[in-house]
Image: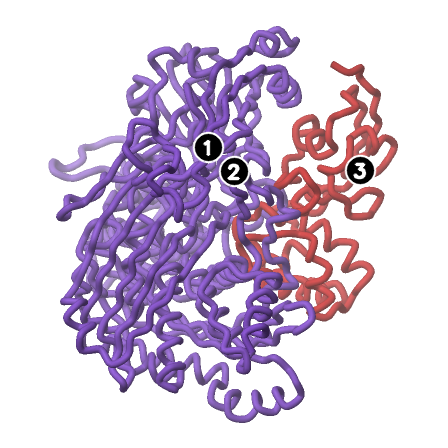
């Protein structure tokens, strides 16, 4: 067993201090140490995108990073986006456009889209599809996700 | 009465899913819970000489390690998962069920040999590396086409060969028809393996509480009730001591139906042994090696026709890959047979089915479940016939459709439920015409395609109809309760994996009780809430479960009207249910809320009249006589890049007839997702095994699931012929999107290369494979 490492990390604006093994993946740390289970793990090799979170505002695969690498950084997960009674505008758009089926890939797609929509206020269909092409979804065929992104972009512009 | 069925209602379950608040199995966290990791075979076929777990047991943090030997008398093969095959004439079937941990021999890569239980998953995986295992490799049965060679190694040493099953089905007199046929099309057709690849891998948490003598299991299963019943039987417990919960499931597509995986039996057993909660979550690599797969078949297929293009007969002698065991019986190949006549009136049919064991993970149904193979066979033969007869692909299909006045149409063979295959209803020609119209078939073929071809563009069009057997029995049930709050509680046994059951089923209730769907709370997949039923599979939720819910709602409605009539002193026929109230029509102030009525029905004092029941509650069941047959047509226009062989889908049209539509929003989503999986099956997703039955592309980086860039926009048209077999008139749709896509790709790609005389007789294709096929044709020129 490895020695423990002191980790100081800010997740969804809350600061956490934890002593953890250096080999703990960021995804496992978020899910099992902080009980933020909204971040899902689909492949553990960085392909499916389900575990995407924001690292200092940038989307990253939390399964490809050790938690200790996030020492001193800001992480945002889907739990930091909105709540069932107070949905973020992108979450609301996914609800309105039926962009969710089983919902397993959804948190990763939402976290990919937050910075995308900030940088691309009026994306066309091709840009949207390219933006989510690193997130696999087995249920929706992506069409209603694309619709949801357009809807969200429209709401965010007005 | 306000309509609810047929409305595009947003899903009530979504806010929880969108905010990370929905409970999936890996989210279950129990104090003092332990974690499991499995040692799996690296060989496809080997004798297991010894397993030394002493070092693993000594590792700090490891609580226990189990091998087959450690299980003692509790080691026994899993139960068969479906009823044994029917006693049709001359059937051969050898039942070989999967084992909980390998003993003596391993039969596929990934078969579990030992399981480590530790304080964390990290430690458990470390300890798996500590185990010394002595495997003595054997010759491998790597494919179905060589499995029955006289000198082939045996997957099961106690059998004379690798034959798992053999069965013949026929209709009419195929040989006599062949003597008179003017056109005979014969081809060998192959379909390879693919994965379901749900985004959530499998997982199970088992928690045995020795003080209450109660076992709680969270399982990524499509069928929580059969799992509960089977676990109780195997563990020597009463069914009342076992609660199985299928919480939110991250996609399933069939393999999560396959109950009693080795892990599914082992983890609860270990929880009882250790008196601790145990969690096992499959990783993606395990998902490729240890979750069931499907589709491998090889057909020698033939179609007989007249010179006018009328089908006289279809025959196919085919091999089906069962993998190492066959607990799921003949479900998949029987589905293939049910679809090998397509939507056509075929007077003569002959099918000779041989199922073989191979050293690969077993096969069980995946979205489509044998149907895509059957449709691929019949549609390919028909396309080849149309070419030979110089007929239009649309016209030859219209000529052969089962006519609308022929329903119910008896196919004279048995289906996957071993019942006579009967097509209940349909009207195929208008659906075909609608799809052809939407894609602009004639205009494209006559005007656009010649123009684009003149510009050297490889554009092709395809149009393929398909049938889908849906909504099979045996039954589902539901209990509906009006609570004193006025909310409606509905409990049903099926699990839910993203199909929108919470909303669609609520709409069925709302339709009868006049409430808002938001006020209907639905519980699915928890045996503590409802414990009769089978599960979510075979496109049956909207048929079997929805009709059970409808039946319960009708009884509750009757109870509401009877009590309200008494309290409001008005005849039942003058009462209306709307907005959560019972009102006397035309006298709006004479009303009572459903909540108050529920309280009145459950008094705390006084006497309930003899022969009556308290509360506004009802439980009812629905079991269809036989399955409802859905129909649809897919059409697409593609352009193939002659350099990269990438296929760009320019337009994709689906016209769907699944009877009554409960929620068009959800229906369209089901079709979108089904088509996306079909596109994978047709052009991207192939599991590549080598001659040692080693899977070469066991990662999502190598096994390519279509992304947003490969899946096109899908235009959907509806057509509705209600099923006469159930009160709602529904037919299933969950698998429909997937079924015709490989056949559609084949037709459209052939159409895109008119100078090559290309024949696509295999699936899946890939850009590489298409390049090879075109090269072969080039060299023949």
Check residue B381 in the rendering and tell me which mark sits there, or answer none: none
User: Which structural element holds mark 3?
Assistant: loop
Q: Chain of mark 2?
A: B
Check residue B692 in the rendering and tell me which mark sits there, or answer none: 2
Q: What is the C-alpha distance between the residues marked 1 and 3?
A: 59 Å
Q: As rendered, which of B277 and B254 lies closer to the eye?
A: B254
In percent of width and height, residue B217 lies at 44, 27
Furthest-right residue in view?
A72
In percent of width and height, residue B429 lies at 32, 80
Q: Quadrant of the N terminus of chain B?
A: bottom left
User: Which chain wears purple?
Assistant: B
Occupied quadrant, residue B458: bottom right
Q: Quadrant of the C terminus of chain B?
A: bottom right
Q: What is the C-alpha distance between the residues marked 2 and 1?
A: 8 Å
In percent of width and height, residue B475 lies at 25, 46
Q: Chain of mark 3?
A: A
In percent of width and height, residue B241 lies at 34, 21
Occupied quadrant, residue B71: top left
**Residue bearing mark 1:** B139
- Report the residue at 20% width, 49% height from top: B418
**Residue bearing mark 3:** A13
Q: What is the C-alpha distance between the residues marked 2 and 3?
A: 52 Å
Looking at the image, residue B592 sits to the left or right of residue B699; the answer is: left
- Report the residue at 50% width, 63% height from top: B675
- Report the residue at 40% width, 60% height from top: B372
User: Which structural element holds mark 2?
Assistant: loop
User: Which structural element holds mark 1?
Assistant: loop
């Amino acid at each position: 067993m490895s020695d423990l490492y002191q980790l100081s990390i800010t997740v969804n604006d809350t600061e956490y201090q934890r002593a953890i093994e250096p080999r703990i993946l960021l995804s496992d740390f978020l899910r099992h140490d902080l009980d933020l289970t909204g971040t899902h793990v689909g492949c553990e090799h960085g392909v499916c995108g389900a575990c995407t979170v924001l690292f200092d505002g940038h989307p990253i695969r939390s399964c490809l990073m050790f938690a200790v690498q996030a020492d001193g950084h800001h992480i945002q997960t889907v739990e930091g986006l909105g709540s069932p009674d107070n949905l973020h505008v992108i979450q609301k758009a996914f609800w309105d456009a039926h962009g969710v089926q089983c919902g397993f890939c959804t948190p990763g797609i939402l976290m990919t889209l937050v910075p995308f929509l900030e940088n691309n206020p009026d994306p066309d269909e091709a840009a949207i599809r390219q933006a989510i092409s690193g997130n696999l979804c087995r249920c929706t065929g992506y069409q209603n996700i694309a619709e949801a992104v357009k809807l969200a972009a429209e709401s965010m512009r007005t | 009465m306000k309509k609810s069925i047929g409305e595009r209602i947003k899903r009530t379950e979504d806010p929880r899913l969108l905010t990370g608040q929905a409970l999936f199995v890996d989210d279950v966290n129990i104090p003092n819970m332990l974690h499991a990791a499995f040692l799996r075979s690296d060989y496809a076929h080997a004798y297991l000489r010894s397993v030394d777990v002493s070092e693993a047991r000594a590792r700090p943090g490891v609580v226990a390690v189990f091998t087959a030997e450690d299980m003692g008398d509790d080691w026994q093969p899993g139960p068969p998962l479906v009823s044994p095959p029917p006693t049709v004439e001359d059937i051969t079937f050898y039942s070989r069920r999967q084992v909980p941990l390998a003993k003596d021999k391993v039969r596929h890569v990934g078969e579990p040999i030992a399981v480590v239980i530790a304080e964390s998953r990290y430690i458990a995986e470390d300890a798996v590396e500590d185990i010394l295992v002595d495997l003595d490799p054997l010759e491998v049965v790597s494919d179905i086409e060589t499995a029955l060679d006289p000198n082939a190694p045996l997957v099961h040493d106690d059998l004379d060969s690798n034959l798992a099953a053999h069965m013949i089905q026929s209709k009419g007199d195929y040989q006599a028809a062949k003597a008179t046929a003017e056109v005979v099309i014969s081809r060998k057709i192959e379909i390879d393996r693919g994965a379901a690849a749900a985004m959530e891998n499998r997982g199970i948490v088992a928690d045995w509480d020795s003080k209450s003598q109660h076992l709680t299991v969270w399982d990524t299963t499509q069928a929580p009730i059969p799992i509960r019943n089977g676990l109780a039987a195997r563990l020597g417990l009463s069914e009342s001591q076992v609660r199985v919960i299928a919480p939110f499931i991250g996609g399933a597509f069939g393999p999560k139906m396959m109950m009693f995986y080795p892990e599914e039996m082992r983890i609860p057993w270990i929880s009882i042994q250790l008196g601790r909660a145990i969690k096992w979550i499959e990783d993606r690599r395990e998902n490729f090696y240890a979750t069931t797969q499907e589709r491998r078949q090889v057909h020698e297929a033939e179609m007989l026709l007249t010179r006018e293009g009328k089908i006289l007969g279809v025959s196919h002698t085919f091999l089906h890959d069962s993998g190492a065991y066959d607990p799921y019986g003949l479900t998949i190949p029987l589905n293939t047979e049910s679809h090998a006549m397509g939507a056509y009136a075929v007077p003569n049919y002959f099918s000779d089915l041989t199922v073989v064991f191979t050293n690969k993970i077993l096969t069980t149904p995946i979205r489509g479940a044998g149907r895509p193979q059957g449709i691929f066979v019949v549609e390919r033969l028909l396309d080849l016939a149309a070419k030979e007869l110089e007929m239009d692909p649309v016209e030859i299909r219209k000529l052969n459709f089962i006519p609308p006045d022929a329903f119910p149409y008896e196919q004279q063979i048995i289906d996957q439920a071993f019942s006579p295959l009967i097509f209940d209803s349909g009207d195929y020609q208008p659906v075909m015409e609608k799809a052809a119209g939407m894609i602009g078939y004639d205009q494209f073929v006559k005007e656009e395609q010649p123009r684009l071809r003149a510009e050297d563009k490889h554009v092709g069009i395809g149009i393929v109809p398909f049938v889908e057997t849906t909504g099979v029995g045996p039954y589902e049930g539901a209990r509906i309760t009006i609570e004193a709050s006025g909310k409606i509680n509905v409990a049903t046994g099926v699990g839910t994996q993203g199909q929108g059951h919470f909303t669609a089923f609520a709409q069925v209730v709302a339709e009868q009780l006049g409430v808002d769907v938001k006020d209907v709370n639905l519980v699915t997949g928890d045996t503590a809430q409802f414990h009769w039923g089978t599960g979510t599979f075979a496109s049956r939720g909207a048929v079997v479960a929805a009709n059970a819910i409808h039946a319960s709602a009708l009884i509750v409605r009757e109870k509401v009207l009877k009590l309200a009539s008494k309290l409001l002193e008005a005849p039942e026929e003058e009462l209306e249910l709307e907005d959560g109230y019972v009102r006397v029509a035309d006298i709006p102030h004479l009303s009572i809320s459903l909540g108050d009525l529920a309280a009145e029905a459950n008094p705390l004092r006084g006497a309930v009249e003899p022969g009556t029941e308290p509360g506004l509650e009802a439980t009812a069941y629905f079991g269809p006589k036989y399955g409802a047959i859905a129909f649809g047509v897919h059409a697409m226009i593609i352009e193939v890049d002659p350099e990269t062989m990438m296929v760009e889908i320019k337009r994709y049209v689906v016209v769907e007839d699944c009877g009554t539509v409960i929620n068009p929003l959800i229906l369209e989503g089901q079709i979108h997702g089904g088509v996306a999986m079909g596109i994978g099956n047709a052009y991207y997703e192939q599991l590549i095994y080598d001659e040692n039955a080693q899977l070469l592309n066991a990662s999502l980086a190598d096994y390519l699931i279509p992304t947003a860039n490969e899946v096109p926009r899908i235009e959907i048209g509806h057509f509705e012929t209600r099923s006469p077999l159930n009160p709602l008139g529904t037919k299933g749709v969950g698998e429909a999107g997937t079924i015709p896509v490989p056949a559609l790709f084949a037709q459209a790609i052939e159409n895109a290369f008119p100078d090559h005389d290309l024949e696509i007789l295999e699936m899946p294709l890939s850009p590489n494979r298409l390049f090879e096929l075109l090269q072969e044709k080039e060299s023949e020129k």
